[in-house]
Amino acid sequence: MLYLLFINNIMDKIRLQSQVKVQNVSLDFQRYLLGKINWNDRLIAIKGARGAGKTTILLQHLKKNLPQDGSAIYVAMDDLIFSDTKLYELAEEFSLLGGSHLLLDEVHKYPNWSREIKLIYDNFPKMNVVFTSSSILEIYGGESDLSRRAISYDLKEMSLREYLELEHGIKLPIVSLEDILQHNNEIATGINQMIKPVAIFHEYVKWGAYPYSRENKESYNSRLRNTVQVIIDVDLHAIENLDYEILYKIKKLIKMIASSVPFTPNISELSQKIGLSRPSILKALDLLEKARIVLSLQKRNSGIGVLTKPDKVFLNNTNLLYAFAEENTEIGTIRETFFANQLQGLFSLNLAEKGDFLVNDYLVFEIGGKNKTTKQIKSIQNAFVVRDDIEYGVGNIIPLWLFGFLY
C-alpha cells in the first residue's frame, strides 16, 4: 500500500514537471526533423549531438500533437526519482492510469535502459514510446537489441536555412539537391530578393550550428568547448565505460585534429604521441564521429568500418572550427567543412579522386572562392564548382551558401 502511494506521488510529480516544461516551450521555431518523424510508430529513437535540440523536439511534439490531459508525459531520465524507482515500474503505473505516450529524454543516463524499454514495448502494446539519446549510443546492439522495434532518426545540427529562420525570422523552404544542381540560378534569384545570403553565411559559420547560440554570442565558443568536454567526460564515459585516462587521451586527439584540419591521420604517429594502440585510435575516431565532434571521410573504395583508417578528418562543423582551431581557422577549410557538414547523413559522401567531394558515387564537387575556375574538373562528367562569396551561379558553378538549404 505504501509502495503504491509512493509511485502515485512520483507520477503526480512527473506529470506536473512535464506540464510546466510543455507550457514553457515555444512553437515559434521548429527543427526540420519535427515534421519528418512518423509519430504513429510505437517506438521511436531520436539521436543527435548535445545542444542540437532533441529535448525541444520532444516537448514541441507533446504540445503540438498530443493531448494535454495527462495521458502523454515528458520524463527526463537523469531525474533523481530514478534513484529509487525503475522506469518499467513508472511505465506500468502510467499505463494503469490511462497513459498512452511516454517521452523519455536522454536514456543513456539511465542504466539498463534498453532492457526496460524493450519490456515496456512488449508488455504495453497501447503505449507509444519516444526516446532521445546521445548520437554515440548504439541502439541496435547490447543486451536488448531494439532493431526490430525502434525506428531511429538522427538530428543534425542546424542548417543555414534553419539559422536564418531562428536568428532573422525568415522562413524559406527546403531545396532538394536535384533542384540546386538544375535550377540554382532561379532559386538563388528568389532568395536574393529577400536576404543577403553571403552575409548570413558568414554569420552562420561562426555561430549558427546550435540553437543555444542565441543566448549569448560572446560566450558561445566557450560554451561550445564546454559542451564537447561534457560529451567526452559524461556521454562517452556513460555509454562506453571508458576510464578517465582514455578520455584524457581522446581530448588530446581532438586538440591534434583541430590544430591541423583537415587532418590526414598517421595512425602510427598518433599512437606514439597519444599513447593509444592502433585499434584504440581508430575506435576513438569512430566515437568522435558518432558524437558529431569530427567528420571522417574516405575515398570511395577505401572500405568502411571502425578499423578502417579515414583519409581525412574534419571537425564536424564550422562552429567547432572557430571554437577549437582558432588561429588555424583557414577559409578553405571553413568552405569544405560547411559543404561536408550540410550534406553529411543526407547523401553518400566521399573524397573525390579529382575535385574535393564525391556525392552519391557520381557527383563531383570542387569547393573554392569566388574566383575558383572549372579547370580542375573540366574533363569530369557530373562535376560542379561550388564558389564562396557569390550570390548567383551559372552553368555548373553554384553558390556555396545554397547548400545550406538542403534541410
Image: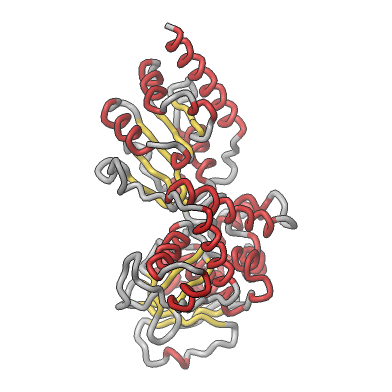
Question: To which quarter of the image does residue 390 belong?
Answer: bottom right
Regarding residue 196, the answer to whether it shows in the image is no
Q: Position of residue 98 (x, y in %)?
A: 38, 18
The residue sitting at the left extreme is 148
Compare residues 117 and 168 and report the one nearer the observer. Answer: 117
Q: Position of residue 123 (x, y in %)?
A: 27, 26
Q: Position of residue 230 (x, y in %)?
A: 57, 51
Compare residues 248 and 151 and report the one nearer the observer. Answer: 248
Q: Residue at x 51, y 25 (%)?
A: 81
Regarding residue 375, the answer to whether it shows in the image is yes
Question: To which quarter of the image does residue 25 belong?
Answer: top right
The residue sitting at the right extreme is 218
Q: Position of residue 35 (x, y in %)?
A: 44, 46
Left or right: 61 with respect to 228?
Answer: left
Q: Residue at x 47, y 82 (%)?
A: 366
Q: How is the image coloured?
A: secondary structure
Left or right: 4 with respect to 124?
Answer: right
Task: Relative to 186, say whether 116 is above or below.
Answer: above
Image quadrant holding the N terminus, namely top left
Q: Residue at x 61, y 59 (%)?
A: 208
Left or right: 216 with respect to 160?
Answer: right
Q: Residue at x 52, y 76 (%)?
A: 262
Task: Relative to 116, say whether 380 is above or below.
Answer: below
Number of numbered discs visible in the structure rendering: 0
Question: To which quarter of the image does residue 396 belong?
Answer: bottom left
